[in-house]
Structure formats: C-alpha cells, structure tokens
Image (cartoon, coloured by chain):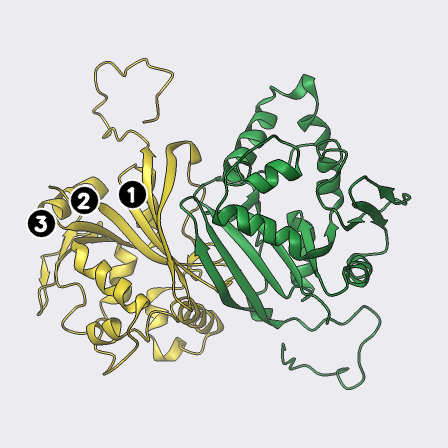
Chain colours: A yellow, B green
Amino acid sequence: MAGKVFFSVTMSLDGFMAPEAVPVEDVFSPARRNDPSVRRWTAKWAALQAWLFPQRWIRENLRLGEGGEEGLDNDIVRATYERTGASVMGRRMFDLGEPSWPAEAPFHTPVFVLTHTRRAPWERPGGTTFHFVDDGVESALRQARETAGDRDVRIAGGADTIQQYLDGGLIDEFSITLAPVLLGTGIRLFDHPDPDHLTLDQSRSTASSRVTHLTYSVVKRRPTVPRGEVPVGQVGSSTGSGT
Amino acid sequence: MAGKVFFSVTMSLDGFMAPEAVPVEDVFSPARRNDPSVRRWTAKWAALQAWLFPQRWIRENLRLGEGGEEGLDNDIVRATYERTGASVMGRRMFDLGEPSWPAEAPFHTPVFVLTHTRRAPWERPGGTTFHFVDDGVESALRQARETAGDRDVRIAGGADTIQQYLDGGLIDEFSITLAPVLLGTGIRLFDHPDPDHLTLDQSRSTASSRVTHLTYSVVKRRPTVPRGEVPVGQVGSSTGSGT
C-alpha cells in the first residue's frame, strides 16, 4: 500500500508559516546578526515555533540538549517524523538547514531537494541522504514515493514548495499546528489557493495548552495532467468535473 | 463586576471572515441575484457558515424552521448569545441584517450601530433595540458596557469594526470558529495587526466533527489613550512599554 503525501507546518493565527524572507547568508552572518531585518526574522520565527523547541523529541533530534517536555505536543512531533519515509524540500529550506542541522541530520530518511543545479547525493551519518532533483516537483515526488515504500512522503517546505504541490493536486492531507501568535506580515501558507479545486474535511483536531493541532484531508483535487500529456477524451471538454 | 468585551466569528482556514464585499443592495436585488459577483458572494458566505445554519438554536432564533442539530456546535452558539448583554455593530452589517432578520430580531438585547447619520432608536419585538451612535467606537462601547451590566459586550462585526476595536486595545478575548474552507480571496479577519501590541493566550480549543472552536485571551494590549487625553508623565516618553 502506497503511503500518503502530506505536509505539516506551524501557522500563525493570521495565516503565516514564516516571517518575510531575508537572505539566507544574512541569517548566519555574524556581521549581519544585529541588522533590524535579521533580528525581526529571528524574533518572528522564534515566536511561531515557541511551542516546538521545548519538546523532548525535537531537543534530542536536533541535539539541543537533555530533557524537554513530554505530552501531546511531543507525541505529535514524534509521530510526524515516524510516519515519514522520505521528504521533499525546497532549495531555500535546505540552504537554511545545511549550516544549522547537526552532522546527524534530523530526517533519518532520504530527502529530495528541489534545485536547478546538479549536485551529487550528500550522505549524512544517521540515515539521512540528500538527493538533489533538477527536473521538477513531480519527479521529486515520484522518487520520494519509491523510496518511502508504505510510509508517507512529507513535503517539508518551505511555503513555495508546499503551494506548488497543493496547487498541483498532489497533497492527500495536511496538518497545521495553529500557534496563538500574530505575525502581521510574512509568508502565507495559503497564498490565493484556488478554492474550487480544494475541498477539505477536518479529520482531526486536538489541542494542548499552547497550540491546536489540526489535520485536514483533501477530498477534491485539481486533476493532475502532466504538461504535454492531455488524456484522450478530455480534449475539448469545457465543463471540467474538477474531481 | 463588569463583563468582558469579545468578538466571535467564523474564519476560513486561509484567514477570511467574509467574501469580498459586494454592494448591500445587490445582495437583495432580484435583478442582480444572478450577477456573478453576487453569486460568488453568496456561495462563499454559505460555505463559510455551512456549520452554523443547521444548528437548532440558530434555526429557532432566525425563524428558519423546526428541528436542527444539537451538540457541541449548537451549545457554543447558544452560549455566545447567552453571555451577551449588548452588541456593537458596524453600519454595513446592520444594512445587511435589516432586511434579513425576522421582525423579532435575533439579539434580544440593545445593539449599538456605528453610523455617521442620526436616527432614532429602532425597537423590535422580543427585546432588541438598535441604537445609532454617531460619535465613535469608544462612545458605542461605553454605552454598550453600561447597558450590559455584568454580562459581556459582543463586537458583532464586520471585519472593519472588529479591527478598530482590536487595534484600539479594547478587546479582552475573542473566539474563532475555524472552518475547513479555503476562500482564496475575501475580507481578512486579521489585516496587518500590530503583533507588538497583541500577545495572545489560547484559552480554549474544542472541536466538533465539522469545525474547531478556538478562544484566545488578549494578554498585552496597546495602551488606550483617548485622543486629547495624554496622561502626564507619558509626554516625551520615546520608549513605550507597550503594556
């Protein structure tokens, strides 16, 4: 049985999954650390993810230190990683992670990075191998599905990557951890989705004292027709069932 | 003991509390009913409120008919009305409601309507009296508080009115019913809030099979200084504690 394709992100109450982007090199530059835009990025990111970093599982996996909280939030974070057989990731997310993750990168599975430049696979201790895919989102997903087996494929992010898979009708379900935070500005998770092609069911909703964990199933998706492969019988159809 | 000032709205997963506005007269005009923009408005509004109108309490209160669902969603709708001692409403919401509500208007308390034109109070059977306030949001809130006694004051909407009270630091808590719906475009509940002056606590989160009901307390608010009344000691302060 093939696994599901999903994403799982934290969203602010006003709909942002990240602060407005700053150049990746600025985030890690000692000289730029006190730049107002970099400070603002870091402060917003920290506010959004404030529920996550105290969790025991994340602290262990990112080598942040001993201890941490156990409970619903921790269980959900661990379950998200355990269901994942492979991940797909945008280039910017990889660029932000590469200097931040511990040597034993926190995925412990294959990760397919969408990029425009060829690069040999990068194998890390602990089971994570980054594969660089330069022939599109569908190719990356196909490769991820093949290696994931009956486990699920996680579209890890960022927002652009998630939106491409969502707009392409390629997402089966998604989870949002809704944080009680207003960011005011930033990168929206849903930036003008097409509501006619995305009908959702709330399949799970559970809350800790900090946040609410929501899961939605996509029940109606845009038909996925790879470019140049219009099926016979649909040519000239102007009605479009949308299913 | 004075009651709280709150609002309670349904929000789509992509952050909208209403479709993009169309002229009020178009919504009720038989000639305009099939206009694409009116049909779109009606369809989106119906999708957003799909959880609400089957509820028994709403059906009774709006005279929609016998029967209806009972359960968590119905209990929450009823509790929201029962806690409310007075409401404040924007002019557009009143204009949409005036031809739609039954003669026995569904508030059964005083309602203060923000307007720029004077009008005598409009008393309806069943306890609702509309008072028209032409001297600002603080005046409307003060009058609502006085009549509500120890019950709460509801800022009924629409989005503009809610944002004015939120930006003014006048909201104690708010409830959002998060619907599993994407509208794509519309009127945002949070349209560029100032995150530095709004710190929230998730105080309640509970879900039915349809929607999730969220309640947040405002724990840090913009200091409310009525225009022309700058307290001695704050003049010349450039730091601003924000509390």
Q: Would you name the residue on which mark 3 appears?
A: A147
Residue at x 45% of width, y 56% of height:
B206
**Mark 3 vs 1: CB contact within 8 A:** no
Q: Which mark is residue A141?
A: 2
- Which of the two residues, B45 or A169, is positioned nearer the viewer here? B45
Mark 3 → mark 1, Cα distance in angstroms: 18 Å
Query: Quick check: B203 above or below B15?
Result: below
Q: Looking at the image, tell me whether mark 1 or mark 2 is earlier in sequence order.
A: 2
Disc 3 secondary structure class: helix
- Which of the two residues, B80 or A144, is positioned nearer the viewer here? B80
| Neighbourhood count class around disc 3 (C-alpha, 10 Å): few under 14, some 14–19, many 20 upward | some
Q: Quadrant of the N terminus of chain B?
A: bottom right
Farthest front residue? B67
Callout 1: chain: A
Q: Amino acid at mark 3?
A: Thr
**Mark 1 vs 2: CB contact within 8 A:** yes
| Labels 3 and 1 within one chain | yes
